[in-house]
Image: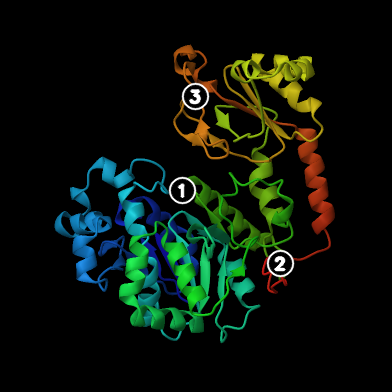
Amino acid sequence: MSLLAILPLFPATIGATEALEQLPIHFKTVLTCIPDFVIYSDFEKDITGHHLHDVFDQVDNKIRNSNPDFELYNNLRASGREGLDYQTLFGSGSGGATDNPGWKLDKWKFMPKVDRALSHRPEAKWFVFIEGDTYLVWQNMLEWLSRFDPSQPHYLGKHMYIGSVLFGHGGSGFVLSNPAMQKVSQRWSEAKAEIEAYTAGEWAGDMVLGKIIKDVGIDMFWGFSHLQGDSPTTMDWNVSELGRCYAPATFHHLNTLEYETLWAFEQQWLLDRPPGAFPRFRDMFKGVILPRLRQRRDSWDNMAAGTEYSAEKFGKLSEDGRSALSSAGWQAPDSFEGCRAACERKTDCIQFSFSHGRCTTSTEFRLGHAADSPCLDCSNAAAKCLEPGGYKESITSSNSEAFIQAGWMMSRVFNYVERLEGSCAHKGAEWISARLETGRL
C-alpha cells in the first residue's frame, strides 16, 4: 500500500491484500489529524466509511490483460477479496518478496497514482506518499516541509539505490511538490507505453518513479534522518548518522501495537511539550524505547547482530582463533549469564541475546519485539531464523516461553542516555533543508 498524503490533504494507495489489516489503525490515529485525504488501491471499495479508489483504472487494458503481474488485480475484479486464497493474501514470504503477487502488482502503482493524485487535488502544494506500515509524524512533516519552497520542483526521499538508479524508498515515505508532480504527470502522458514497458522489466515501482523523476530533470533531496526505513523498535539507535536532535517524519514496518504506542507518545508529547517544540529522536527514545529495556527479557528478540558464540561457530574457528578466544567466550553459549559476561567483557557491547546454546553480542542498539513461539518469525537484523535445526526438539513445555532471551547492559544504556541529554539539552529540533555539495545529507 502507499498512503499518499497531500498537504493539507492526504491521499493514499493500499493493496487489497493489506487493506483490512493496515488501514483501520490509520483511521484511528494519524488520519484523525488530517483534514482531507484520498486512498488509492488495486481494488475499489469502501472500508469503515472511507472510499478506496482503483489506481489501475487508467492503465492500458492490453497491459492489464496480458501481463501476469496483473493476475491478482484481475482476480480481484472478477471475484473480490473473498476469492483470494491464503497464499495470495499473504504471499509466499515477506512483504518485499519478489514472488509475492501483491508485490508484483505494487510496482505498477507508482506512476498512475502520481497522475491521479494530481488530477484529484491539482491545487495542492505538497504530496506526501507513505505506505500501509509507515507511521507519519504529521506535526514534524509539516514543520520540515515549511522549510522548502513549494513553487519549486522538489523530490524528497530516503535514499536507496538499485544499480545506478537513486530513488526515494516508498516505505520510508517520499514527497513531491506540485511542480514536480506536474513534470512527472506530463512525462507519463507523453511516454506511457515506454514507461510501462520499462516497468514490466523491473521489480520496484519506487525505483521506476525515481528514474522518471530524474529523467525530467529533478534530483532527489536526501531526506534521511527525517525519513526512516525502520520502526523505532527495529532501528539501530547506535547509528551515529541518525542525528538524535533531528525530528523524525516517518517510520516504516510498524505493526498495530507500535502504531498505538507511537500515537500515545505523540498525544502525551503535545500535552507536555515546551512551546514551539517538536518531538526528536532523543525524545522518542526516552519516551518509547528506554522504559522497555531490561537487564533481561524472556521470550524477546532484541535482534542482536554481531559476534556469535555457539558450537557451530566454534567448530569453524582456526587454531589461532580458538587460541585467541577468551574463557568468557567459550562459556558464552552455556547460559544467559555466560552470554552477559561475554558482552560485559567488550567495552562497546550494549546488548546480547541467548537462545539454547547460541549467544550473540552486539554493538548495535535495538529494542526488538516479543518472540511468542520458536521460529515464529525471522530476525530482520540477522536475516536468519531464530530456531536453527534441532532447537525445536530441545524445547520443552517448561522452557518454551523463554526459548530466546534478550539482555541490555543497563549501565551502558544510561551512559547512552547521558550523552543524548548532553547533545540535545540546549537545542530544539534540527531540520535538514540544505543540500550538501555531494548531494548527500
Distance between the Cα atoms at labels 3 and 1? Answer: 25 Å
Residue that label 1 marks: 256
Residue that label 2 marks: 277
> Of the residues tagged 3 and 1, which is closer to the observer?
3
Whether residue 174 sits left or right of residue 438 in the image: it is: left
Whichever of callouts 3 and 1 sits on the residue coming sooner in the sequence is 1
Whichever of callouts 2 and 3 sits on the residue coming sooner in the sequence is 2
For the residue labelled by badge 3, is the local secondary structure a helix, a strand or a loop?
loop
Q: Residue 420: image x %, image y %? A: 79, 51
Q: Is residue 270 above or below residue 374?
A: below
Q: How is the image coloured?
A: rainbow
Residue 6 in view in this figure: no
Q: Residue 141: image x %, image y %? A: 59, 69
* Residue that appears at 63% across and 19% down: 316
Distance between the Cα atoms at labels 2 and 1? Answer: 27 Å
* Residue that appears at 78% across and 26% down: 344
Q: Residue 414: image x %, image y %? A: 79, 40
Whichever of callouts 2 and 1 sits on the residue coming sooner in the sequence is 1
For the residue labelled by badge 2, is the local secondary structure a helix, a strand or a loop?
loop
For disc 3, the neighbor class at 10 Å (few under 14, some 14 to 19, many from 20) is: some
Identify the image quadrant of the N terminus. bottom left
Residue that label 3 marks: 387
Identify the image quadrant of the C terminus. bottom right
What amino acid is labelled 3 in the image?
Answer: Glu
What amino acid is labelled 1 in the image?
Answer: Thr
Q: Is residue 149 above or below residue 374?
A: below
